[in-house]
Image: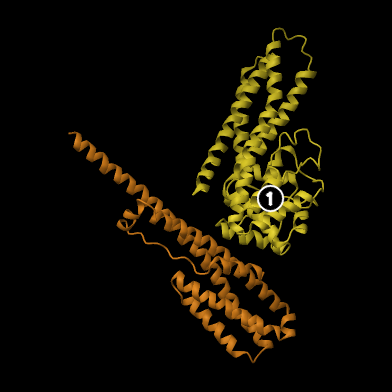
Chain colours: A yellow, B orange
């Protein structure tokens, strides 16, 4: 029962973020336009259209982009029969259509799911994960990922990954332009300059905050509904324990896609990151394990 | 005047309630039958694998006729079973009968070493797991649907709208566990 309201809330949030993105970009271009003294209003219109297209594009193609940037490859049943069967069995148990099964050649154990709805979904695990986990542990992890698919978390996460990633790149670019462009001629635009600067600094923080708000609580939820599927909390608990102990640095993962994974690929022991600790996309593993063990 | 207005509101209210209730019950009921067809797919796969298995085992173990006949009979009655209850019952018996075939195979090292046999054994185990999972999904849908039928005030109207509770598909949680361990 609870899960259906979660689904509609996710669908609604996806639209909200897509709309906010368009509003944000258009405003940003408007301010930038003034700040740089271009005075060209049609630029704002173009930005509006492009941002709209990007929003729609991120809805349909976020999974493909995520898969392309992670370097994951689709596999057939014969290549990894155990992994494939686990996905098959659990999607039957969850009443989901069979997702595409992908693999990432990476010794760091991790997994993620993506796609815009259960019919277009992808489950991906790293080779490190497959080598490290027992059957029951792998089941726990895959069930967790399938819960993300079932809840429509993947749709929201995919859109967030693309749009937020784009904003991060854009603001980075903008900071450079503002600092290094020769702005001696611009009289009276100092105020806009400051506004633009504030926007540029705020936007990645806002983006990170969005990422946080969409991913922390749902990790717990996915853990719980995953366990409902396997009926075996210990499987996921010991899988998470193994992830906690592992310190292999991940090969591919970026800030924009961090929240897609079962465990934050940038845990402070692995990669030094400015935002870890303070801005963490995942609740602490110990906490998740503790909850699972008390089920 | 006021009383008629109140009566109209009550009637419209009940009407709307019935409409929503009917739609939500129909939706749950469809989910149940959809989930059941998933079990059927797996049961079908199982009945398709059995003749192959018997042929393979026969090649090595000719003297175990009783076991074969029993499995074949159960297979036929599984294909003929109509209600979820009956299907579940026969399916459980078939699971036990298949176990006896694999027990028989233990005595024939050549059979155990045969690629074909190994593959069939794996396929059957996989199917058994899939039956367990589809059963779990079906039963959770039945639980949802039956709960909707039995909570207050739905319980008064469900009968009126001619909805009957759905049957669970046999096997308890404990049995499902043993299936998983044998993996």
Label 1: few (<14), some (14–19) or many (≥20) C-alpha neighbours in 10 Å: many
Q: Which residue is mark 1?
A: A289
Name the side, left or right, on which B147 lies relative to B59: left
Residue at 53 percent across and 67 percent down: it is B172
Question: As drawn, which residue projects farthest toward the top?
Answer: A187
Q: Residue at x 46, y 77 (%)?
A: B80
Q: Which quarter of the image is occupied by the C terminus of chain B?
A: bottom right
Left or right, B150 with reference to B116: left
- Name, please, the residue furthest toward the left: B1
Residue at the extreme bottom:
B63
The answer to whether one can see residue B115 in this image is yes
Chain of the residue under label 1: A
In the image, A164 versus A49, the foreground residue is: A164
Q: Nearer the viewer, residue A165 or B98?
A: B98
Q: Nearer the viewer, residue B166 or A203?
A: B166
Q: Secondary structure at mark 1?
A: helix
Residue A120 in sight: no
In which image quadrant can residue A24 be found?
top right
Q: List x then y, in percent, for residue B147.
A: 43, 56
Say which residue appears at 75% left-offset and 33% top-offset.
Answer: A275
Give x and y (percent) for residue A28: 65, 23
Q: Can you say whether B27 is above or below B110 in the image?
A: above
């Amino acid at each position: 029962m609870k899960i259906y309201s979660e689904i509609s809330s996710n669908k609604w949030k996806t639209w909200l973020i897509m709309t906010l993105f368009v509003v944000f970009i258009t405003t940003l271009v408007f301010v930038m336009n003034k700040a740089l003294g271009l005075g060209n209003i049609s630029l704002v219109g173009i930005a509006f259209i492009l941002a709209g297209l990007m929003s729609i594009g991120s809805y349909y193609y976020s999974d493909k982009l995520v898969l392309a940037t992670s370097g994951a490859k689709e596999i057939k049943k014969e290549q990894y029969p155990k992994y494939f069967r686990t996905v098959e069995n659990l999607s039957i148990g969850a009443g989901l259509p069979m997702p595409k099964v992908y693999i990432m050649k990476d010794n760091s154990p991790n997994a993620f799911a993506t796609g815009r709805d259960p019919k277009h979904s992808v489950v991906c695990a790293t080779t490190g994960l497959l080598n490290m986990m027992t059957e029951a542990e792998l089941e726990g992890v895959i069930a967790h990922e399938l819960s993300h698919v079932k809840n429509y978390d993947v749709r929201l996460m995919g859109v967030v990954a693309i749009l937020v990633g784009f904003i991060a790149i854009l603001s980075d670019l903008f900071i450079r332009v503002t600092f290094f462009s020769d702005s001696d001629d611009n009289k009276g635009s100092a105020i806009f300059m400051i506004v633009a600067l504030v926007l540029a600094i705020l936007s990645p923080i806002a983006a990170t905050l969005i990422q946080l708000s969409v991913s922390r609580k749902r990790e717990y939820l996915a853990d719980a509904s995953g366990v409902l599927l396997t009926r075996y909390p210990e499987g996921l608990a010991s899988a998470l324990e193994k992830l906690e102990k592992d310190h292999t640095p991940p090969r591919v993962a970026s800030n924009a896609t961090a929240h897609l994974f079962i465990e934050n690929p940038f845990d402070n022991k692995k990669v030094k990151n400015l935002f870890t600790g303070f801005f963490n996309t995942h609740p602490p593993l110990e906490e998740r394990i503790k909850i699972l063990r008390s089920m | 005047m006021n009383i008629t207005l109140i009566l109209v509101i009550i009637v419209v209210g009940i009407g709307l309630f019935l409409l929503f209730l009917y739609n939500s019950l129909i939706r749950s009921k469809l989910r149940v039958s959809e989930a059941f067809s998933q079990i059927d797919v797996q049961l079908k796969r199982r009945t398709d694998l059995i003749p192959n298995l018997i042929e393979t085992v026969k090649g090595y173990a000719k003297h175990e006729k009783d076991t074969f006949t029993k499995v074949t009979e159960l297979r036929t009655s599984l294909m003929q079973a109509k209600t979820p209850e009956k299907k579940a019952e026969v399916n459980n018996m078939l699971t036990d009968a298949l176990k006896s075939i694999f027990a028989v195979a233990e005595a024939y090292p050549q059979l155990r070493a045969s690629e074909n046999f190994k593959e069939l054994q794996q396929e059957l185990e996989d199917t058994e797991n899939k039956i367990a999972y589809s059963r779990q999904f079906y039963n959770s849908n039945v639980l949802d649907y039956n709960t909707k039928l039995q909570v207050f005030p739905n319980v008064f109207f469900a009968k009126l709208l001619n909805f009957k509770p759905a049957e669970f598909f046999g096997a308890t949680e404990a049995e499902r566990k043993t299936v998983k361990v044998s993996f």
